Image: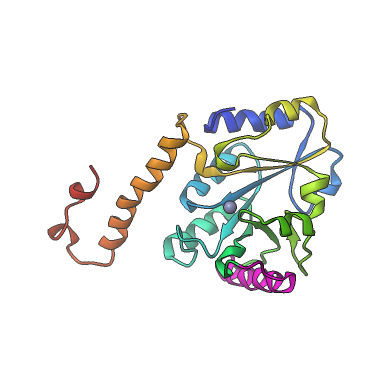
Amino acid sequence: MDFTFDSYGRLLAIIQEQGYKIADYYNWESFDRCVILRHDIDNSLDKALEFARFEWEKGVKSTYFVLVTGDFYNIFSRHNRKVIRDIIDLGHEIGLHFDQTVYGELALDTHTIREKILCEAEQLKTVTEKNVNIVSMHRPSRQILEGDLQIPGMTNSYGRLFFKEFKYISDSRRNWREPVESILTSGEYRRLQILTHSFWYYDEEKDLHDTVKSFICGANRERYDNYKNNFTDLESVLGLNEICG
Ligand SMILES: [Zn+2]
């Protein structure tokens, strides 16, 4: 499948045609055959909102996992607070996307990982204004994938249940390692967790190179606009045409 909104729409249609219910991390047990849709937001909350709107148009609810510690977006900014709340208003759930590597190179002990997750979930809650009950790991370590980490009051989407008992498929690095559509049409699995990254999807198909390039080059414009909001008469110092060719 290619990485366009249309293709994702087709994927949603296949899920439903094959008799799967689109479930979430709370209600999946009510369905004999179900798919949980999950999105990890590694780079861009704006792209996630675009995706959230698309799913809303299709009548689908899913879970968006937000990084509190990433370098690409700040969840506490005025703009991003609104984006996160807009995603919630579209009916989606917000979970925590947790990157344990920000706490150092050494593997953390389980107790510390748990503590950090609960602490970040509290921070995210100040933006969502509702409890953050689900966590996914950013580039999970073997320790996490094999450890079945339990966190009091929270669901771990990489715990044994959702990672081993559900069929887990992901488009990480813009690459479906397994053919998601035929896995669904085969009907082989009763329960699936499908991870997509909204960052890869556009109206028109772009390859990996162009997708990454437009994100990196587009940052100039974003940074210019942010600076303009904080620096009177920026144009007299540096013209927009000088940075966006
Ligand atoms: Zn991630």
Q: Is residue 180 above or below residue 53?
A: above
Which quadrant does the N terminus fall into? top right
90 or 237: nearer the eye? 237
Pick the front one: 82 or 119:
119
Quadrant assignment, res 186 = top right
Which of the image's four quarters has the C terminus?
top left
Looking at the image, which is closer to me, 215 or 228?
A: 215
Q: Residue 121 lies in magenta, yes or no? A: yes
Q: In the rendered view, would you say 121 is above or below 191? A: below
- Residue 169 lies in quadrant: top right
**Residue 211 image point, x, y percent:** 44, 38
> What's the residue at 56%, 60% (across, down)?
67
Residue nearer the viewer, 230 or 104: 104
Taking the image as shown, residue 143 lies to the left or right of residue 105, namely right
Q: Is residue 17 magenta?
A: no
As drawn, which residue projects farthest toward the front? Answer: 106
Image location (x, y in percent) of residue 163: 76, 48
Looking at the image, residue 69 lies above or below residue 15? below
Q: Look at 58% across and 70% down and name the residue there.
A: 103
Q: Which residues are magenta?
A: 106-128
**In the figure, residue 111 lies in which quadrant?**
bottom right
Q: Is residue 23 left or right of residue 217?
A: right
Q: Position of residue 161 (x, y in %)?
A: 82, 51
- Name the residue: 46% across, 50% down: 46
Residue 207 on image: x %, y %:
46, 32
